[in-house]
Image (spheres, rainbow, N blue to C red):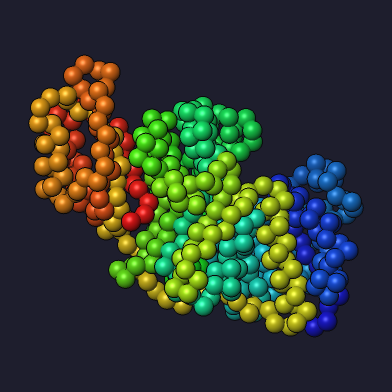
Amino acid sequence: MDKKIIRAALLGFGTVGTGVYKVLQKQKEDMIPKLGSQIEIKKILVRNLEKAAAKVEDPAVLTNNWDEIVNDPEIDIVIELIGGIEPARSYILAALNAGKHVVTANKDLIAVYGKELLDAAEVHHVDFLFEAAVAGGIPIIRPLKECLAGNHMAEVMGIVNGTTNFILTKMTQDGMEFKDALALATELGYAEADPTADIEGLDAGRKVAILASVAFNSRVVFDDVYIEGITKITAKDIKYAKEMGCDIKLLGVAKNTEEGIEAYVCPMLIPSSHPLASVNDSYNAVFVNGDAVENAMFYGRGAGELPTASAVVGDLFDIARNIKANCCARIGCTCYKELPVKKMADTYSRYFMRLIVEDRCGVLAEMTAVFAKYGVSVAQIIQRAARAEESAEVVVITAKVREGDFRTAMEDLSGRSSVRKVSSMLRVYGE
Ligand code: HSE
């Protein structure tokens, strides 16, 4: 089909929607030479027509009536940027069922209903693209589905939440405590009014579910991902981690092991020499390991108006090219396997822990005896006299151990009278 004008509709005109509108305007002169066709925004679905009018050249594009979009045969592409589950899910399904291509940045939806949406796209032979759903402006979905398709991926992991990375950076570089760093992030607009999804790791968990599904060709949903946030991290943990040669980052990790997929998000110590340790402020980075490519890292802006719009517009251009070449739905769902997802208790890691113990003869021996009972071996240890009388602070990094065994050891240990407090327990990334 040699279509010169491709019409699209935007659902939602918030930060990312406005960014998409701006990027398309900046690309106006380049689209014909780049794509052979011109993408026009025919309609923008908004709640408040008056408020949105100031942001567009022609207010006639604005509507608050979804039927005008879904029933318009001229609209080829629907760009869903409302976010959340409903009405986004119903709108996307209706658009796909009406034979329209869909671009979305909606990670909440894909992490739970990805299969349903991709199946609908396949049935109707249309494109359903979601590059912007993971790590904003960083290209990672298409690289995994296309450029890296010749690999069996062993691992995809990284820093996929800018808000928490900003907070941890402030805690590391300026010695701030969590609540002060969060207040600063809110003041600077990095954290939303309700920061729960970011600081509790939920946003990153959704991205890990999507990354694992795409990387390992097997569906992983949000509920499969083990999640811990950063609210309990203290400046002291970060200081000890530094002494032990590590930084603390909120990592999203997905591994493809012989026993199944591991998928988790948690604050982890990572050796300061690892490239991800120097990904700071609100930047994101995704690190992949495949049997052919070995290691590759993708770094950039994981959020924001124009970076996220960059990914959305890349998807739009891809669809425009597909329409022009009459080859839509070339790459749909890539989950052709059904791999099990491991329980967190069956994963292996090194652990960092900070304990307040009684300062007397034999306490360390008791500690290591408990560890030995459950196969936990101590790799590094720091002991400092604590302020409280007759107590000492002990910081330990263990050798690799099964999480279930480590937890049993910690339950046993924290029940001992010599252990006054388990202040922190974190995983350590790497071998
Ligand atoms: N709130 C996210 C972040 C961006 O801080 O990275 C959108 O997923």
Q: Is residue 300 above or below residue 331?
A: above
- Residue 385, percent across and down? 25, 23
What residue do we see at 41% from left, 68% from top? 154
Answer whether residue 124 is visible to the viewer in this image. Answer: no
Q: Is residue 368 above or below residue 423?
A: below
Q: Is residue 144 above or below residue 392?
A: below
- Residue 110, percent across and down? 54, 61
Q: Residue pushed farthest top? A: 389
Left or right: 239 in relation to 95 = left
- Residue 84, percent across and down? 58, 52
Query: The C terminus lies in which quarter of the figure?
Result: bottom left
- Residue 152, percent across and down? 45, 74
Judge by depth and name the residue closer to the eye, 114 or 204. 204
Answer whether residue 383 is visible to the viewer in this image. Answer: yes
What residue do we see at 43% from left, 39% from top? 230
What residue do we see at 39% from left, 74% from top? 338
What residue do we see at 17% from left, 25% from top? 358
